Image (cartoon, rainbow, N blue to C red):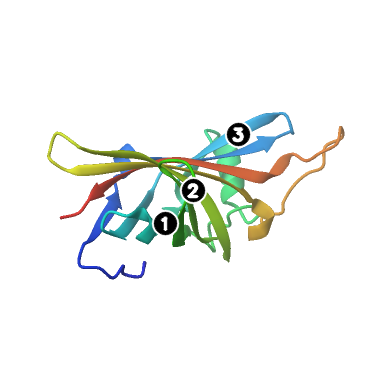
């Protein structure tokens, strides 16, 4: 779990999974893109004085909930060739720091991404969309999170060479998510 942020004005936010989405995209056959969705996840953000540069973020997801819209491909993704669901049923990310960029509402989130039995430093782009109250009086905040990783860095090396050159599955995986958080009382 995350380390507590030390401040009298600390707020905790939790992911509203019903209003959030997490996707990844990977090139297939060099010329097309396959999109995967992670269906079951949770997470939190704790920060002092509502300043994201002080925040600690935590995210975890069930590998079994990954879907690409094709049952056969999903079974292969969950096998030992890729995520190895039997031995690694969860993936997680824990931030180590947030860094403001030169653009308004834009940040770099540094942390460690852990899946397939490998924990590796990762930096993701974060865009703050704003806060608002829902009809029930809950304060919500929305962040867009994106980035690119090399699947080989986590030991996901299965592939097939193509007759025309290149590989069946690209090494680069693009992460795209829209995360809605709810402020806890």
Helix, strand or loop status at disc 2 = loop
Between circles 2 and 3, the one closer to the viewer is 2
Q: x, y percentage for residue 81? A: 66, 53
Q: Which residue is mark 3?
A: 34
Q: Quadrant of the C terminus?
A: bottom left
* Cα separation between marks 2 and 3: 30 Å
Residue at 36 percent of width and 61 percent of height: 54
Residue at 74 percent of width and 39 percent of height: 168
Q: Which residue is mark 1?
A: 60
Which numbered marker is on residue 89?
Answer: none
Badge 1: residue crowd in 10 Å (few <14, some 14–19, many ≥20): some
Classify residue 68 by image quadrant.
Answer: top right
Q: Which residue is mark 2?
A: 101
Q: In the rendered view, does 122 fall on the left or right side of 107?
A: right
Q: In the rendered view, does 29 fall on the left or right side of 33?
A: right
The numbered mark, 2 or 3, whose residue comes first in the sequence reads 3
Helix, strand or loop status at disc 3 = strand
Q: Is residue 104 visible?
A: yes
Q: Quick one: which residue is furthest to the left in this view?
A: 136
């Amino acid at each position: 779990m995350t380390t507590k942020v030390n401040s009298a004005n600390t707020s905790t936010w939790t992911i509203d999974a019903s209003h959030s989405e997490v996707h990844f995209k990977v090139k297939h056959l060099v010329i097309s893109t396959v999109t995967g969705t992670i269906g079951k996840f949770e997470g939190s953000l704790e920060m002092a004085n509502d300043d994201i540069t002080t925040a600690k973020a935590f995210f975890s997801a069930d590998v079994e909930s990954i879907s690409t819209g094709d049952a056969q491909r999903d079974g292969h993704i969950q096998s030992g060739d890729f995520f190895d669901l039997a031995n690694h049923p969860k993936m997680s990310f824990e931030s180590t720091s947030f860094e403001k960029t030169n653009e308004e509402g834009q940040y770099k989130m540094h942390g460690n991404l852990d899946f397939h039995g490998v924990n590796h430093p990762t930096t993701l782009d974060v865009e703050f969309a704003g806060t608002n109250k829902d009809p029930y009086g809950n304060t919500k905040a929305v962040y867009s999170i994106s980035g690119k990783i090399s699947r080989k860095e986590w030991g996901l090396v299965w592939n097939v060479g193509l007759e025309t050159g290149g590989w069946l599955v690209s090494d680069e995986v693009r992460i795209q998510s829209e995360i809605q958080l709810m402020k806890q009382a």
